[in-house]
Image (cartoon, rainbow, N blue to C red):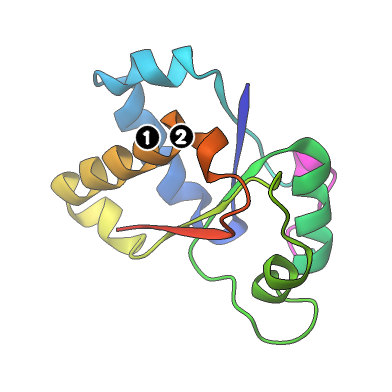
Amino acid sequence: MLELVPDVNIQGHFRSLEMLIRTTEWAYYWHELGCVTRSFADLGLTRDAQDNVIWEALRARDAILITANRNQDGPNSLGSMIARKDSVSAMPVLTISNPNKISRSKEYALHVIDSLFEHLVDIELRRGTGRLYIP
């Protein structure tokens, strides 16, 4: 099972992607890979949880964060956590470059889905890579 955790600022965007996935040929791959969407609450996190707390919760669940805006500002930021605590076994953080474009362009949304699945299909090879970008 692959647990995907959309960050609080892109939950709506990710729901739109998930609806597209379920109505296209990607639904087969979603099911075959055992993809499941989890919320911060599912991981015992609050919406305003600090990045370091989020990182530890993700590592404990072997879950994948889908985000758009986590940075490297300060010692507890997600970028700092990746730099300091990433290991060869850690799932990557997937960062969507332009989440607002998802709702404006179906073509872009499908491009994001293609890129997402490129990473998910080979997720075991991407462990320890830190952050990966989706167009």
- Please name the amino acid that badge 1 sits on: Phe
Find residue 29 and report its image quarter.
top left
Residue at image location 69% in from the left, 48% down from the top = 90
Disc 2 to disc 1, C-alpha distance: 5 Å
How many callouts does the rendering have? 2
Query: Which quarter of the rendering shows the C terminus?
Result: bottom left
Q: Is residue 55 above or below residue 40?
A: below
Judge whether residue 98 is colored magenta: no
Label 1 residue SS: helix
Residue 120 is marked as: 2
Q: Residue 110: horizontal and vertical position, in percent?
A: 22, 40
Q: Is residue 46 visible?
A: no
Q: Residues within 10 Å of mark 1 (few under 14, many from 20)?
A: some
Residue at image location 30% in from the left, 47% down from the top = 112
Residue 41 left/right relative to 34 = right
Residue assigned mark 1: 117
Q: Residue 44: horizontal and vertical position, in percent?
A: 85, 44
Residue 2 left/right relative to 132 = right
Q: Which portion, as a residue range, is magenta?
A: 41-48
Q: Residue 121: horizontal and vertical position, in percent?
A: 42, 29
